[in-house]
Image (cartoon, grey):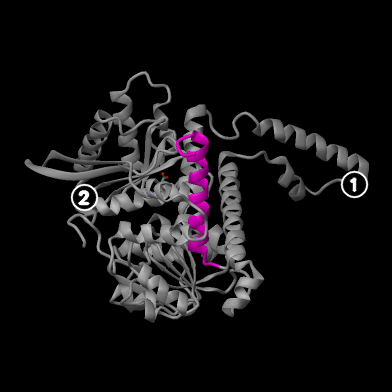
């Protein structure tokens, strides 16, 4: 029976859908039933109502912060602003954060927050008021802090909201030298890390590239190896969808369709993503982009012919009503929970490979982890070692030139002479994390002959069990 405050998917609540994934994975490993129950449950659910004066009138705002798991601390996860926010949704997204962090070896428990507002309809000064009030409610109940719970951007939020959270937290907790680490996704000037903005989209790119580079997987799907020439559809041109599109386009993939709230655009020869964004900025819509065909019903874009479909907006967009019409060979879940379990069964029968959210969109939290470390160490990545490596490399080049008795070309020298900047460390750290995660999951998938989602959940459960056992909580 579905209760009020639950997100209805095909036949179960969003939270129950994720529980089903866990149950499916648990069949392949021996796990104590009580421990599995503890892993599934949300440890703390904080539901807040607070009044805010907007345009001279009092409005009561509904908000949440859910800490799903405390097996590692702090808890970590974004805060979303959307009219669809409800308790079931935030609980589910908090649970996904736990599994995501476990898979990627990020030492955090999962959390999520949400405020039930439409940020596009609220002027910035009121958004600031709401964000600051929400933060002070979190402080009051000890639901935020560098070692307690660290929010980040999510659907409908970004750098400016994270700045307000940081500022409110630090003024309420004066003298806390680590207060910068109370939230991630901040602007660089406020302790943010380079590369955080594009991190989720870049992680999506690395994950899809890894799959496409595998000859065996591609020939099973009847596709060529590599990203070059792959036809891609992206639903949602927010921060995640936009950056994923940009990196995929740059590596030679063909973006045949882009879908937004107002409709979708299609061009079988490919859309130039940067030009689409310019058009969007100028006209306020992606529709009527020169050379492309408009698709009025945006959800129809999901059903077009392509090699890779990337839902990058909200949950449940692929459900039992449209799963049969999906023609893509690969689906990359850039959003959280875009496919319902019923849809997944249909898609599996059709032979579609799904790269699941808990792995594919973990790039955001991975770079948030790097930002948190930067804030706790109070120093930018590369600041100490950059010049040292440049000096050593210059000496090394001189030695090679002497031994080889020839001058090395300037353009070759430049490759070695540049020490790593913060952005180089972040990109390589993210790339390494995504590649390692992919192959660890794939080894489990191949050894048990199961799909990537179930293999990802097995990895997550095993990691969490290990933590509980080593903590001594479960024998
Ligand atoms: N909101 C993002 C997610 O769902 C990022 C969370 C974070 O950086 O903590 O993964």
> Is residue 239 visible to the viewer in this orientation of the structure?
yes
Q: Which residue is mark 2?
A: 116
All told, the count of numbered labels is: 2
Question: Residue 279: x, y in percent?
Answer: 36, 65
Q: Please, is residue 163 above or below residue 363 in the view?
A: above
Q: Is residue 451 magenta?
A: yes
Front residue of 27/171: it is: 27
Query: In front: 238, or 443?
Result: 443
Which element is circle 2 on? loop
Compared across the picture, whether 334 is left or right of 287 comes to right
Q: Residue at x 28, y 76 (%)?
A: 297
Give the CA distance from mark 2 to mark 1. Answer: 67 Å
The stretch of residues the image draws in magenta is: 450-475
Image coords of residue 426 (percent x, y): 56, 44
Q: Reply above or below: 86 against 293.
A: above
Quadrant including the N terminus:
bottom left
């Amino acid at each position: 029976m579905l209760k009020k405050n639950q997100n209805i998917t095909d036949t179960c609540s969003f939270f129950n859908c994720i529980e089903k994934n866990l149950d499916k994975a648990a069949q392949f490993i021996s796990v104590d039933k009580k421990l599995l129950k503890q892993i599934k449950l949300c440890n703390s659910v904080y539901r807040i109502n607070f009044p805010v004066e907007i345009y001279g009138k009092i409005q009561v705002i509904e908000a949440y912060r859910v800490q799903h798991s405390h097996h590692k601390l702090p808890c970590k996860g974004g805060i979303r602003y959307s009219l669809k926010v409800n308790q079931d949704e935030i609980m589910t997204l908090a649970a996904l954060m736990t599994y995501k962090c476990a898979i990627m070896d990020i030492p955090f428990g999962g959390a999520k927050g949400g405020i039930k507002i439409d940020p596009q309809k609220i002027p910035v000064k009121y958004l600031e008021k709401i964000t600051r009030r929400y933060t002070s409610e979190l402080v009051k109940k000890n639901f935020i802090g560098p070692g307690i719970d660290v929010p980040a951007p999510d659907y409908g939020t970004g750098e400016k909201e994270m700045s307000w959270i940081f500022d409110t937290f630090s003024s309420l907790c004066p003298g806390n030298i680590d207060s910068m680490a109370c939230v991630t996704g901040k602007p660089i000037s406020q302790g943010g890390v380079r590369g955080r903005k594009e991190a989720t989209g870049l992680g999506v790119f690395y994950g899809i590239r890894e799959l496409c580079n595998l000859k065996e997987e591609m020939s099973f799907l009847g596709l060529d190896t590599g990203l070059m020439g792959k036809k891609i559809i992206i639903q949602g041109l927010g921060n995640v969808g936009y950056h994923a599109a940009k990196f995929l386009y740059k590596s030679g993939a063909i973006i045949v369709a882009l879908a937004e709230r107002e409709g979708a655009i299609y061009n079988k020869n490919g859309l130039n993503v940067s030009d689409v964004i310019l058009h969007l900025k100028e006209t306020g819509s992606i529709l009527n982009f020169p050379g492309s065909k408009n698709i009025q019903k945006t959800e129809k874009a999901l059903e077009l012919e392509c090699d890779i479909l990337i839902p990058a907006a909200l949950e449940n967009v692929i459900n039992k009503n449209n799963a049969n019409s999906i023609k893509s060979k690969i689906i990359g879940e850039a959003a959280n929970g875009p496919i319902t379990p019923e849809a997944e069964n249909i898609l599996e029968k059709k032979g579609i490979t799904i790269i699941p959210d808990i792995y594919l969109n973990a790039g955001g939290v991975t770079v948030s982890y790097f930002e948190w470390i930067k804030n706790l160490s109070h120093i930018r990545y590369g600041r100490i070692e950059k010049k040292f490596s440049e000096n050593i490399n210059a000496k090394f080049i001189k030695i090679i030139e002497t031994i080889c008795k020839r001058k090395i070309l300037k353009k070759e020298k430049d490759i070695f002479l540049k020490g790593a900047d913060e952005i180089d460390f972040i990109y390589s750290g993210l790339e390494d994390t995504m590649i390692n995660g992919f192959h660890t999951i794939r080894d489990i998938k191949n050894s048990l002959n199961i799909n990537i989602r179930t293999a990802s959940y097995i990895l997550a459960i095993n990691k969490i069990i290990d933590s509980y056992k080593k903590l001594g909580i479960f024998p």
